[in-house]
Structures are given as C-alpha cells and as structure tokens.
Amino acid sequence: MTAIARSIPADRMAVLFAIMLVAAAGNTAMQSILPAIGAKLHIPDVWVSLAFSWSALLWVMTAPHWARQSDKRGRRALMALGIVGFLASMALCGLALWAGLSGAISASTTFILFALFRSLYGGLGSASPPAVQAYVAARTDAEERTQALSLVSSSFGLGTVIGPAIAPFFILPFVGLAGPLLVFALIGLIVLVMLRWRLPNDTPRFAARGAIAPYPLSAGPAEPTAEDENDRDPSTQKALGWRDPRVRPWLLAGFFGGQAQAMMLGVIGFLILDRLHLRLKPDEGAAITGIVLMAGAFATLLAQWGLIPLLKMTPRTTVLYGAALGAAGILLTGLAQDLHAIVIGFALASLGFGLFRPGFTAGASLSVSRRDQGSVAGMTASINGSAYIVSPAVGVLLYNWHAMVSYGLMALFCGWLVLWGWSALQQEGHQPQA
C-alpha cells in the first residue's frame, strides 16, 4: 500500500480494501456450504444455483444507478449503503437457513426466503464497489491508477474466493451450517464501523454531473469543490455508453472471462461431492470444499499481489495470460479424479482469473478520462454481477448432464478470449486526457 500512500493514506486504503473484500465475499460466501445445505434439504442442484440469480440480476440493474448517485451524494455514503445491504442480507439469510435446517420451516419456504433476503445484497450491496472504484480513481494520478485499481480489484477478486474458502470454518454449534452467514454479517458490521470512523465524508457541496476531477494531494485528499465536481458546460459532454469503442473491448473481455469464473465457482462444490463420493457426507464435503477454495485464494493472492507488480504487467497482458491459465486450470479440474488433482487444477484456474480480473478493471478505467470514471465503475460492477445471473445454474445443468460439457464450455470462453483479445485489446493502459 505504501506505493500509493501519497494519494490515499494507507489507513483509508485499508478501509476501501475491506469494503471491496466484504462486498465480494457476500456474493460467494455460500459457495462452499450451499451444496451441503442443498443435500441436507434434498433440494435439486440447479435450484441451489438459481438461489443466486435474482440477487445477481438486481446487482446488474442497480450498480449503474448507484455509481451515478455516488457522484451526487458522496462515495462514503454509497459505500455505507452497500455494507448495510450486505450485513442485513447475511443476517436474514442465515436465520432463514437455520430455521430450515432445524425443521422449523419447509425446504421450499427456506429457499424462497433465502432468495428474497439475497435481494437486499443485490439491490443495495451493489452500491459499494463502484463508489470505491470512483473514490480511488478520483484520488490517483494516471501513472498510479493501474496499481491502485489493481489493489482494490484484488480485494474484490480475492473476496470471491476467500469468502467461501473460510465459510466452513464458521460452522458453529447450535446454528450449524447457517453459522458462516451470521459471522459474515458480524464482519460487515465491523467494516461499517471502520468506514464511519476512518474515512472522511466526501459529500459534494453541489449536485455532481459525473465529473471526477483530480484533487490537491499535497496534504492528503481534500474536500471537493464545485469546480472539482462539476463541469463548466455539461451540455457539451456526451455520456459514456456501453457501445463506446474505448470501453467495449474491455467490457466484452470482462463478460466472457466472468462467465467462465462464475461457472467454475458454481460447479466446484458439486464436483467435489461427486468425485470424492461425499453426497451422503455433506458436512465433510463442505470442509473439503473450503480447503480447495482456500488453495484458489492463495493462487489469487500470488497473481494480484505478486506477479502483477513484480512483472509490471499491463492490463492487456494480464487479461490474455490470465485467460490462458484459466483455461488450462479449468480443463485439469474437470478431468481430476482425486483431491490432489482438484486442488492443483482449481488453483491454476484461480491464478489465471486472479490476473484477468484486475486487468479487465484497470483496462476499462484507463481507456476513458476522469469525468467518466463513475460511469465506467458502474459498468464494470454490472459486468462482474452479470456473470452470476445464469452462468452458475447453466454450469450445474451442463455438469449434471456431463461434467466435461460444463468444463469444456468454461475453457472455450477463456480460449476465445485469448484469440479474440490478442487483436481486440490493443490499448496498453494510456489514460486519455480529461
């Protein structure tokens, strides 16, 4: 964090890192325990995957709105809203699952309530990531932005893996498999306190029109002024669109790579139950799934905290190399027949996606000027969320038909991204002038 301390103090960057980590963990924390819960409640695999779909759809629909609101109401306020949505969703989902597992309510009622309470995360939790990204982009120079966005994006990418990896360790007496959700709700409350305590309020004094201009940094982040937050003649500025040629290649890369990663995370728990013959031992399956996902977490850390800064990789390079490694790891996982091979394959795929995700995020940000950072942050958040609408369920459906059909489709997404991206992703992260 010291490399960007002159733009954003380390304690504030730590808060931003924690917010992104928790927001991502909220989307995938159940990955290691839901297959076991579904087995205990005798819920078909595909319905377990579909429990995420409604929340993901709301994420895609609301993230651009919250990104625009962060320009108007201040980034800290939107970060707080997202964390509140997260902790409320975790607490209520945990209580619903505990009631279902204890027999107080039926299995169908349990999953209906679960999907309903997950909508709090999808509708409100999506406010945090674009607000964090816009906050960082507004307070870093173009030369620093790749590293700064790589750091906060690494927390988001890490959260998608670390959340389900540690969830089995929070299976507690009395609440059982619902324990991880209740613990994550408590973690969300702690992060909310950190946000209120350590991050200064940045509410604009005037209504913003989307411009995110640089601030005086000699004495740390300053309060925005009317000139900083607003454009002189907003009517002459065209809003950033999804078909804008500057961002379209990066958004397409994020879409296809994200589908593969979402399928991989959605299927891995069921693959472990089947390949290791643990359908009748769901608690043991949840613990082993945690081990496999923890290996993926370490591989993600190696990619984002080791390889990217050590090799000084550009956004284009990280996307292409990440997709290639992801394809190799996916195929190895799909062919694995024992725990050792599953761990190696999943770790290799996670290493690839650990490179891919920050490359896609930084590439999209660096393709536009500062005034469009709020919009591009909302777009990248929507792309990340869109992967979880149908891809996990489709992956499970194909997996139940034949495992290699599902894993072959994931590898195909990554392979196509390498071939297409070689010519389509030509920008090497040069920041346009604001």
Image: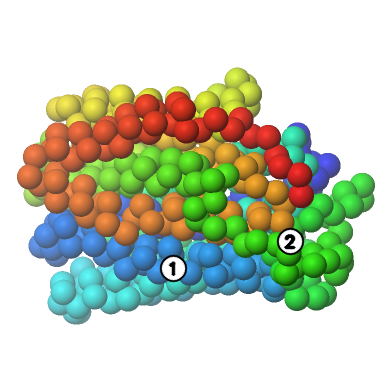
Q: Whole-percent x and y of residue 109?
A: 19, 78
Relative placement, left or right, of 99 versus 59 is: left
Relative placement, left or right, of 129 versus 110 is: right
Disc number for residue 150: none
Q: CA distance from mark 2 to mark 1?
A: 22 Å
Task: Please name whichever residue, 244 or 392, is drawn nearer the observer in this view of the structure.
Answer: 244
Neighbor class of circle 2 (other Cα within 10 Å; few <14, some 14-19, many 20+) is many
The amino acid at mark 1 is Met
Q: Kindly identify the residue that appears in the image at 60 percent across and 20 percent down.
A: 311
Disc number for residue 61: 1
Q: Nearer the viewer, mark 2 or mark 1?
A: 2
Coloring applied to the structure = rainbow
Question: Relative to 369, is 253 above or below?
Answer: above
The amino acid at mark 2 is Ala
Question: Relative to 314, is 139 above or below?
Answer: below
Can you identify the residue that label 2 sits on?
211
Task: Please name whichever residue, 306 or 235, is drawn nearer the observer in this view of the structure.
Answer: 235
- Report whether residue 287 is seen: no
Q: Secondary structure at mark 2?
A: loop
Residue occupying the far top of the picture? 311
- Report whether residue 70 is seen: yes
